[in-house]
Image (tube, grey):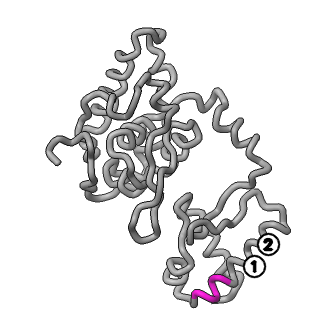
Amino acid sequence: MDFPKLKSIIEGLLFLSGEEGLSIKQIAEIVDQRAELVTDAIEEMIGEFSRHGRGVQIMKIAGVVQLGTLPEHAAYFEKLAYSPARSSLSQAALETLAIVAYRQPITRVEIEEIRGVKSERAIHTLVNKDLIVEVGRAEAIGRPILYGTTKSFLDYFGLASIKDLPEPGLFEDSENLEEETQLLFNKLDMQQPDAPENDVQSVFDFEDEGSSNEQDFAGHTEDEDPWNSSK
């Protein structure tokens, strides 16, 4: 494999890995090249991205390599995250938020196993709206990001703590997920007596994220669930 092709493949891998990133060892195993060669390629890419004024950068964080945006562009990203066109959440994001609320801390892969479809876009939406946040890293291969709900989530629904959530559904697989999610947010709506009518629904109106076209996953995870009385 020639060096330019190696760099191109690495860039694609980093893009697909999202916020979780990849370790040098993982990349080397995927491309079937020496770790030293992968390191050299990444170092060269870091310089090239900077010299060419790219809108993204390659970062090394906690032993993993990932793509990230430039801090000096943060003001523009905030406008995107909080623009009126993005003030509502899709069914995919609602389902993801419900899963995180009841199964936290939880990784992206575990969320996807429960939903049965890819959920990276929904997770990014919730992070941008300050409803979920990275709370740590799982003790597993690649140290995947663990997600949990934020203080903003509690404040919006008038909850003192996450334990004040309504009695949950199972949130274990995709079979009844839409119904369970709608029931949860209806209950949260009723818990806000001073809020304007349909206030929750106005913020969490559904947008079509094309979730029906997302790739299916098989199986589901059995994670620790502090609200599951059977454990």
60 drawn magenta: no
Left or right of 215: which side holds 173?
left
Q: Which of the two residues, 98 or 93, is positioned nearer the viewer here?
A: 98
On the rendered image, what quadrant is the N terminus found in?
Answer: bottom right
Give, as a single range, the part of the protein colored magenta. 35-39
Q: Position of residue 116 (x, y in %)?
A: 33, 51
Report the number of numbered marks. 2
Tell me which amino acid carries mark 1.
Glu
Write the residue at 49% across / 25% down.
156
Q: Which of the two residues, 168 or 44, is positioned nearer the viewer here?
A: 168
Q: Position of residue 134 (x, y in %)?
A: 51, 50
Q: Is 143 rendered above or below residue 26?
A: above
Which quadrant of the figure has residue 107? bottom left
Residue 13 seen anywhere in this rendered image of the structure: no
Q: Which of the two residues, 142 or 176, is positioned nearer the viewer here?
A: 142
Q: Residues within 10 Å of mark 1 (few under 14, many from 20)?
A: few
Q: Is 102 rendered above or below residue 64?
A: above
Tell me which amino acid carries mark 2.
Glu
**Residue situated furthest left in the rendering:** 230
Main SS, magenta residues: helix
Judging by the rendered image, the residue that carries numbered circle 1 is 44
Q: Which of the two residues, 82 or 208, is positioned nearer the viewer here?
A: 82
Write the residue at 42% across / 38% down.
97
Q: Position of residue 32 (x, y in %)?
A: 52, 87
Are the residues tagged 2 and 1 within 8 Å (C-beta)? yes
Judging by the rendered image, the residue that carries numbered circle 2 is 48
Q: Is 118 rendered above or below residue 96?
A: below
**Residue situated furthest front in the rendering:** 160
